[in-house]
Structures are given as structure tokens and as C-alpha cells.
Image: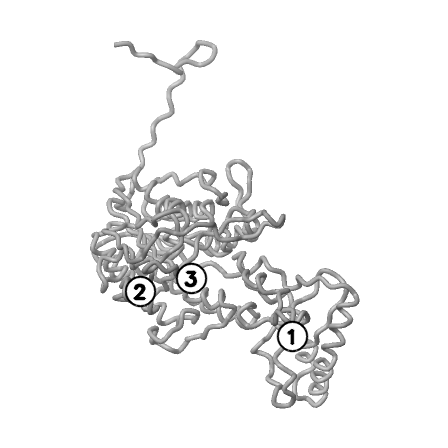
Amino acid sequence: MIVLLLGCNNDDGGTPIPPEPEIEYTSGSADFTTYVALGNSLTAGFSDSALFIDGQLASFPTMLASNFALAGGGEFTIPLMADNLGGLTLGGQAVRGNRLILDFSSGDPTPVEVEGSGATEISNTLAGPFNNLGAPGAKSYHLLAPGYGNVAGVALGLANPYYARFASSGTATIVGDALAQNPTFFSLWVGNLDALNFAIAGGDGIDQTGNLDPSTYGNDDISDPNVFAAAYDGILEAITANGAKGVIANLPDLKVLPYFTTVPFNPVPLDAATAGLLNGAYAAYNGGINQLASLNIITAEEAAARQISFSAGDANAVVLLDEDLTDLTGFNPALINMRQATAADLLVFTSQTIIGTLANPNDPTSINGVAVPLADKWVLTPEEQQIATQAAAAYNQTIEALAQKYDVAFVDAKGLLDEVNETGITLSDGSIVTSDYATGGGFSLDGIHPAPRGYALVANEMIEAINAKYGSNLPGVEPLDFTGLYIK
């Protein structure tokens, strides 16, 4: 037998250089043998407005599992989609679209659905169990809801199309399917949709604070903080009952998400002639508002906020409906709740598909956002922002308190994503991950979910918290190994 020894000496032939000692990774007081991940789209690896194989393989739980494997962790199974398109069908009919890609054909990069027919049929159920139990669309209380994975309930809006693919039965719960695996470790990141769906819909839902019956909630409603607290406590009580340890994370601020920060409040270009025509058209509205202010029907401040004025240039504010304005239609039906947007308003990402289009294809003057005010669903007003952020703040207080109650590792995901948004995070090659839409590397093309590189930052934050809590020495992952933007 011939044994070749390579790389044992330094360049000048002197004293041999000893090899780097191999690191022995340990789980500390944790046990990573059976790891389950509970949550929603953030746990599943959702990005670019869809769930697809590459995204699932780049989920933060998959990254955690790869580290856990270094210290006794076992197999980590995933209910993989059928392809990398991401579309879902039920009975052959499309119920979810494909993932987004950037289309450069117009010269201006635009997110569009990738072409093709998704092959993931919801009724083709998978045989588990699965360690990644993330169900896109799930709110906190859904993790405890029997029947949330019933295929028969999907068409009725009573079940989750993603969980229906891999639920152990039509009456199962996500937490129950987790417990059936006798987990030794878990991650839980859920609750963002309890308030975020309201914001995504431009505040078009209902604040259900005071209503303790989540079965009466709509998809875009805000969950009562007590309902959230009871659900979160119930999840942790169940999952830790047999001694499992874990890591939980709080919820990000909606104002860091590109979905709310990409479309400016003043995107309307006008020439002087068009601006003059519009000002003439709104003169009666402005005059009527001022008249009612002079009669003390509304304040001077509200009257000023409701004045609509355009000028020549590229930065005219859109016109919108605001339900929080005083209803003046009883005095004059033409004085609807209308004003121009300000920098304090957040236009949702999808508003760019309506601004500048015609409300009436046969009327070239019926321009949405200019002559026709934008509906409530396209704009998150300051009042609506406050409703959503107050709810999320209450949820975060609950999460941090329950981390202490159940003695599990806690991750400040809100602080991490605040940093991505405010200063960016510098990687080992000097590049910086930011929240800039499409180019920042932190968020995917839907403007809500992280890109794989953003998920890597979350995974490392979790690993740091796990090491600190349980005395493990896991190495984390290299964010540069994961893409900041999927290229077609």
C-alpha cells in the first residue's frame, strides 16, 4: 500500500504545519434527534409568491436541520411540491399561481408569473410524516384547528391547500402531526398573518379585537390579541409537554417589507396642460370642502388635508379614498371621502397594476389614482398602519413572555429585519443584504417573504440563539451559498 502525505510541510521545507483540528459539534443541553418546524409560509420556504421545490430546500428549517445533523440531528423530511413552478390545482383547476420572475422584455424589469402549468395537485396527498410542517397562509390558531388539512374543505375556504397535501388525516391538526413524531426539538415562527393579511389587503379587513371567536374571522381580519395569546400558549404547552426544547421568533414590522415601501405615494407624471385641466375639475370639490370648514363642519386641518392639487412634473400624489375622513356626503353627495396621498401613506405593491389604468375603458379621462380615487384596498393609511402595528406589538409581547414561560430560545426577528431595512447586513465578501426590492437580496419578488439569502440570515440568528440558550456550538450557514434572487 502506498500512502501519499500531502500538504504537511510549510513552503520552505521546515517544521511541518499541523492540520487544523476538526471541530466537534455538540448539541449542548438540546437534543436535535427529531426536529419539527411549525409555522406558515415563512417556515415552508415560500418566496416569489409561491411554494416550489428550490424554495423549500432553501427554507430556514432546512438550514437549521443541516446544522443539527452535525450534532446528532436526524433526517428532515419535507412535503415537496411537484415542481419549481409553484402552481397549485384542485381537481385540475388552478387555485394558486406560479412563482414570480422578472420580465425584462419591456426594458423595465417587471415581476410576472413564470410560464407553465404547475403539476402540484392538492388531492394527490402525500404519505408522511414530515418534519417541515409549515403551511402557507396559516394564522396562529390554525395550527390547532382540526380539519385544517381536509382536502374536501379547500374549495370551501375551510382548509389550507398546502397542509391538505400532507395532513395525516382529514381531521388532523398541524400540532398533532408534530406531536405524533415525538419531537425532541422544534422551531415556531407563526403569527405574522394574524395582522399582516389586514395590511396586505390595504386595511380592507376588520379589526377583530374584542371578538374571541376566530371561527367568525375573515382572511383579512386582525386576530384579537387574546386569541393569539391563547393559541400560541396552547401550541407551546403541547409541543413542550414531553420535554422538547425549541426556538421561537417574534414578528417583523410591516414597514420593513418591500410590499409596502416600493410604490411611491407620488408616482403620477403630468404636463402643465393636464395638471391645469385636473385642477379645474377638482375646483368644485376643493371649494365645497372649504365651505364646510368655514361652517365648522370639519376642521381647517382636515380641509387642508382634503385639498386636491396637481402640478407639472413627475411627482404628483395619487388620489385615494380614506374611510377615516369625515363623511360629508350628507351635505353634498359629491364630497366623498377623498384626498391625495402623503408620504405617511403606504401604497401596497400591487397598486402599481391599477394606477394610471382606466376605470372605464371607454372613457380616457377615467384614470385610476388621478381622476378616479384609489379604493381602500390599494393604500394602507396611517390609521390602518397603527391598527396593524399595535396588534403585532401585542403579539410580540406575548411571544417574548411565552419564551420565558416555556424556557425556550427566543429570536428577535423583528430586530434582524429592521437592521436589514435600515442599514443592511454585510456578508463575508463585503456585499450588503438590504430590503430594496429585487436588488437587495433580503426579500423575494413578492415583497413579503425573504429570499433564500434572507432566510439564511434568519437561520443564523436562530442558531445563535440556540447556541446561547442550550450551550451548543453549531456553526451556522453561509448566506452567500444561497441566492438573493432566483434567475429564470
Which of the 4 image quarters holds residue 383? bottom right
Q: Between 298 and 221, which is closer to the camera in this rendering?
A: 221
The residue at which mark 2 appears reads as 233
Label 2 or label 1, whichever comes before in sequence order: 2
Residue 239 percent location from the top left of the image: 26, 58
Residue 236 percent location from the top left of the image: 29, 60
Is residue 175 left or right of 218 when viewed as pictured?
Answer: left
Determine the residue positioned at 33% across, 12% down: 4
The residue at which mark 1 appears reads as 339
Disc 2 and disc 1: Cα gap in Å? 43 Å
The residue at which mark 3 appears reads as 192
Disc 3, SS: loop
Q: Is residue 45 above or below residue 361?
A: above
Label 3 or label 1, whichever comes before in sequence order: 3
- Density class for disc 3 (Cα within 10 Å; few <14, some 14-19, many ≥20) is many
Residue 158 percent location from the top left of the image: 32, 68
Label 3 or label 2, whichever comes before in sequence order: 3
Disc 3 and disc 1: Cα gap in Å? 30 Å
Disc 2, SS: helix
| Tag 1: amino acid | Arg
